[in-house]
């Protein structure tokens, strides 16, 4: 079988010597190689975050869901598990994809491992009960990359915002129809592709024509603060937690 540099024979990224079990007599669960001492009676929260990260990197949904359950029984903060564990794993997989060390099937397995763990953690997110406002979110037309947008949605909801999720490949007309219907304080657009980000200025113009007070923010791997400045967006954030802070600043929450 072809073995890629930096990966084992199953296509799992090499995690270095620190992750290789010393005691190989215990059965391994799935393709994951634990980085903590299974003999010790207590896992630290850092071990759980690391395990969640590794489960996403190796696309191991059994491990990601089992670890999410462990996190809940240990009463760990669900938000931190998503940010420090699952999201970190997805960023690692994205980088490996860029380096051509993993390919589409692995990416999809990783996304599934992450989403299944998120579903378990979601009900345990501490949700701010006062509604802080309405945010319309969508991935711009021609772009189907919605993993990042879904994380932004999740953390916005946890912060108490009502989120109208327009999904992926959202047309300008769909953004406009949605703001007419839900009168949001903020519209957030996501783009991961240079071919789709060019549609953002048109959406901004159309939204402003309907309501000049709505704040418009952008994010996703294809865009940057300087692109946001160029097209006249009200803000940019490079991760979901920063997106929530940015929204809070813009709506004065
Ligand atoms: C996963 C992935 C896929 C998956 C998507 C699954 C899904 N449901 O999303 C699949 C395999 C389907 C896919 C398909 C394609 N992909 Co792809 N994909 C990726 C990959 C590896 C990771 C993206 C990702 O999910 N990252 C993890 C998330 C958590 O990060 P994120 O999206 O950046 O989101 C964070 C922040 O940006 C921010 N954020 C995100 N949105 C928003 C919104 C707001 C308002 C704010 C404030 C913040 C914010 O918060 C998020 C969480 O922290 C990237 C490579 C990369 N390094 O990004 C390529 C990449 C985006 N894909 C690429 C391409 C070309 C494609 C395809 C065209 C491939 C093909 N030839 O068919 C198709 C696209 C079809 C289409 N029309 O969209 C290119 C784009 C190149 C470019 N510059 O235009 C990339 C960059 C890979 C590459 N270098 O070639 N892809």
Image (spheres, rainbow, N blue to C red):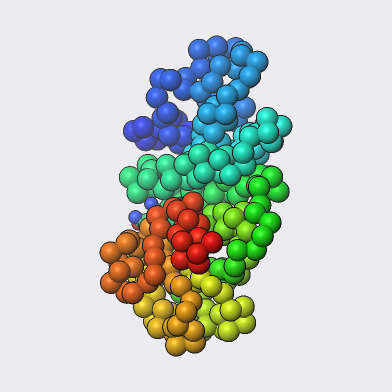
Q: Quadrant of residue 47?
A: top right
- Along the line of sight, which residue is nearer the eye, 215 or 237? 215
Asked if residue 134 is positioned above or below residue 19 in the image, the reply reads below
- Along the line of sight, which residue is nearer the eye, 181 or 252? 252
Residue 121 lies, in percent from the top left, at 66, 44
Asked if residue 4 is positioned above or below residue 157 in the image, the reply reads above
Give the quarter the ligand 1 occupies. bottom left
- Along the line of sight, which residue is nearer the eye, 121 or 251? 251
Identify the residue shown where x is 45% and y is 30%. Answer: 9
- Along the line of sight, which residue is nearer the eye, 150 or 216? 216
Residue 171 lies, in percent from the top left, at 49, 79
Identify the residue shown where x is 40% and y is 83%. Answer: 205
Is 203 placed left or right of 229 in the picture?
Answer: right
Regarding residue 59, the answer to whether it shows in the image is no
Identify the residue shown where x is 52% and y is 78%. Answer: 175
Q: Residue furthest bottom?
A: 209
Is 6 placed left or right of 75 in the picture?
Answer: left
Q: Quadrant of residue 73?
A: top right
Identify the residue shown where x is 37% and y is 35%. Answer: 4
Q: Which corner quadrant holds the C terminus?
A: bottom right
Regarding residue 39, the answer to whether it shows in the image is yes
Residue 14 lies, in percent from the top left, at 41, 30
Residue 36 lies, in percent from the top left, at 54, 20
Asked if residue 5 is positioned above or below residue 139 in the image, the reply reads above
Q: Which corner quadrant holds the N terminus?
A: top left
Is 36 placed left or right of 2 in the picture?
Answer: right
């Amino acid at each position: 079988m072809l073995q890629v540099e930096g990966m084992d024979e199953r296509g799992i990224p090499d995690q270095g010597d620190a992750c290789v079990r010393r005691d190989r007599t215990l059965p391994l669960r799935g393709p994951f190689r634990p980085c903590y001492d299974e003999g010790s009676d207590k896992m630290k929260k850092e071990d759980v975050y690391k395990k969640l990260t590794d489960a996403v990197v190796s696309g191991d949904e059994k491990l990601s869901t089992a670890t999410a359950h462990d996190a809940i029984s240990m009463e760990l903060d669900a938000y931190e598990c998503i940010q420090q564990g699952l999201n970190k794993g997805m960023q690692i997989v994205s980088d490996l994809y860029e380096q051509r060390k993993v390919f589409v099937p692995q990416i999809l397995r990783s996304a599934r491992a992450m989403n299944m763990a998120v579903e378990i953690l979601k009900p345990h997110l501490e949700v701010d009960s006062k509604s802080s406002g309405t945010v319309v979110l969508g991935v711009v037309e021609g772009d189907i990359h919605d993993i990042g947008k879904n994380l932004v949605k999740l953390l916005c909801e946890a912060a108490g915002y009502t989120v109208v999720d327009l999904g992926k490949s959202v047309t300008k007309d769909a953004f406009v129809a949605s703001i007419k219907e839900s009168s949001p304080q903020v519209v957030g657009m996501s783009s991961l592709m240079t071919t789709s980000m060019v549609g953002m200025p048109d959406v901004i113009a159309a939204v402003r024509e309907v309501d000049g007070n709505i704040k418009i923010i952008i994010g996703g791997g294809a865009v940057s603060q300087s692109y946001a400045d160029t097209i006249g967006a009200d803000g940019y954030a490079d991760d979901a937690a920063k997106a929530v802070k940015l929204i809070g600043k813009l709506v004065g929450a």
